[in-house]
Amino acid sequence: MIKTDILIIGAGPVGMFAVFEAGLMKLKCHIIDALPMPGGQCAEIYPKKPIFDIPAYPEILAGDLIDNLSRQIAPFEPKYTLGERAQDIEKLNDGTFKVTTNKGTEHFASVVFIAGGLGSFEPRKPPIPNIANYEGKGVEYMVKDPEKFRNKKIIISGGGDSALDWTIYLSNIASEVSLVHRRNEFRGALDSVEKVSELSKAGIINLITEAEITEISGSKNLESVTIKDRKTKESKEKQCDYFIPLFGLSPKLGPIGNWGLEIEKNAIVVNNALDYQTNIPGIFAIGDINTYPGKLKLILCGFHEATIAVQYAYKIINPDKKYMMKYTTVNGVTGFNGEKKEAKKEVVKSI
């Protein structure tokens, strides 16, 4: 039996940052995640993917972001239940919550934060008849270790940010990179589209638009794909070592969808005008898993949501106390072990 102040479901970057904000207010956190390690998609799916919209980091790899967050929250000694899925939730008579995992581990907390990202997910697969035969044998739905593709011939398919980002990144690693997309227009960030166009004009990558992969073949492992021109209907075979279709993920809320929460388009509705609570008092949803008018699915927005949610969670956990917010530049950071990182004092001379 595990007891804590805030139980966080989801060990992605937003859930991890909530630990930091809670720690500043002397609130203890315990995190549940179905993955065997903290970090969520950033650690499991694209640890080597560069992220460009984290403040103060012009560029940071997703895996490095998780490493930094781990160091940031370490003073507050978060506890984890990893490799287990939050299965059932029960609101007890005293207003607290009991959350049980699929392996029977029971957790008790005053409040619950759902920070499950997109929920459980699986890659969207292209409708190629025999693609399952080559999964793990040349067909990859995500890039975990870019070094796997060093000096290899790679074909990427897709038109979103992931396809564009990995095309750019792998152009410095693979011996040949081709990007195949059904249309001339891309859905990704404009600067990424421009960068791919520049790489194509420079002959560094092969950009093949208004086309799609219709067949894949190989005696044992993948050896080639067939690319069909959608205008002329002509097909040509192209040799490759790896085919990486990047058509996004199919998100599913899983057991969370059965908890009586208000759901809209596979996301949890929250009150963003106040505290990011759900329709069940005491349960908050932060990060990509929530929805509200004007919602942006960005990590930095999730950090903001976590910060606000913790402030209101404190009021639920300590109804008779008033918290006075102080800047960390003044107070420093004190963990539950009593160690304190002192804030640097600067003398400002007025002119």
Image (cartoon, helix red, strand yellow):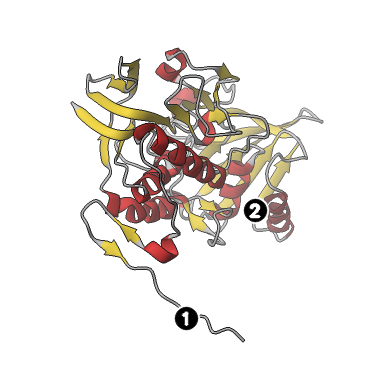
**Mark 1 to mark 2: distance in Å?**
53 Å
Q: Residues within 10 Å of mark 2 (few under 14, many from 20)?
A: many
Q: Residue at x 29, y 41 (%)?
A: 28
- Looking at this view, name the residue that lies furthest to the right: 231
- Badge 1 local density, few (<14 within 10 Å), some, or many (20+)? few
Q: Nearer the viewer, residue 93 or 341?
A: 93
Q: How many marks?
A: 2
Whether residue 144 is visible, yes or no, is: no
Q: Residue at x 58, y 26 (%)?
A: 126
Question: Which is more toward the observer, 36 or 308?
Answer: 308
Q: Nearer the viewer, mark 1 or mark 2?
A: 1
According to the image, label 2 marks what residue? 205
* Residue at figure coordinates x 54%, y 45% from the top left: 154
Mark 1, residue position: 347
Quadrant of the image occupied by residue 290: top right
Residue 296 pos. (x, y %): 63, 38
Kind of residue indicated by mark 2: Ile
Work out whether 260 lies above or below 230: above
